[in-house]
Image: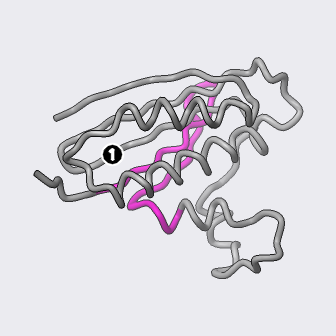
Amino acid sequence: MSKKSQLQVRSTLDELSLVLDWFNQLHQPAIPKTVWMQCQTALAEGLTNAIRHAHRGKPTETPIEIEVTMQARSLEIRIWDQGAGFDLAQRLAALPQTVSQDEIGGRGLLLLQRLTDRLSYRRTGDRNCLLIVKDYVATD
């Protein structure tokens, strides 16, 4: 099983429900529900970060591309933005391991790191790609 789907959205939080509806239509019975929900949360966090941080100050028409690839034992989500980019490993290393519930921000990257099996962010041409990978054991 290898299935790939793509979606392009504008840089506005109004697109989040559209993205989550699209993502939920991709669900395959072999992917455990817990894994699916973790991927859904990671997708929402990644998209929100791209809109709020990478595309801050950019027109809402600035596109964000999302690609979901489902394999037999893993689910990959790629989110492409057109922001300045940053060093994900350095940012993660600098984060406190616990974030107060009273904090306004700061939980997104920590949550992404905890929900995923592999997480990377790198420049590809004139865009950045956040890669989120979640491994799973298929259910029958």
In the displayed structure image, the side of residue 34 where residue 45 appears, left or right = right
| Image-quadrant location for residue 35 | bottom left
| Relative image position of residue 96 (x, y in whole percent) | 69, 79
Using the rendered view, name the quadrant where residue 23 is placed.
top left
Which residue sits at x=25%, y=49%? 31
State whether the magenta stretch is mostly helix, strand or loop: strand
Q: In x, y percent, where is residue 105?
A: 79, 63
Image position of 95 with respect to 15: above or below: below
Q: In this view, does 46 lie to the left or right of 5?
A: right
Give the residue type at disc 1: Leu
Query: Residue at image x 74%, y 21%?
Result: 62
31 vs 127, left or right, is left
Boundaries of the magenta span: 113-135
Residue carrying label 1: 75
Q: Residue at x 63, y 67 (%)?
A: 92
The residue positioned 70% from the left and 42% from the top of the image is 85
Q: Does the stretch in magenta take in 116?
A: yes
The colour scheme used to paint the residues is: one colour
Report the number of discs.
Answer: 1
Is 45 contained in the magenta span? Answer: no
Image quarter of residue 64: top right
| Residue lying farthest to the top in this orientation | 61
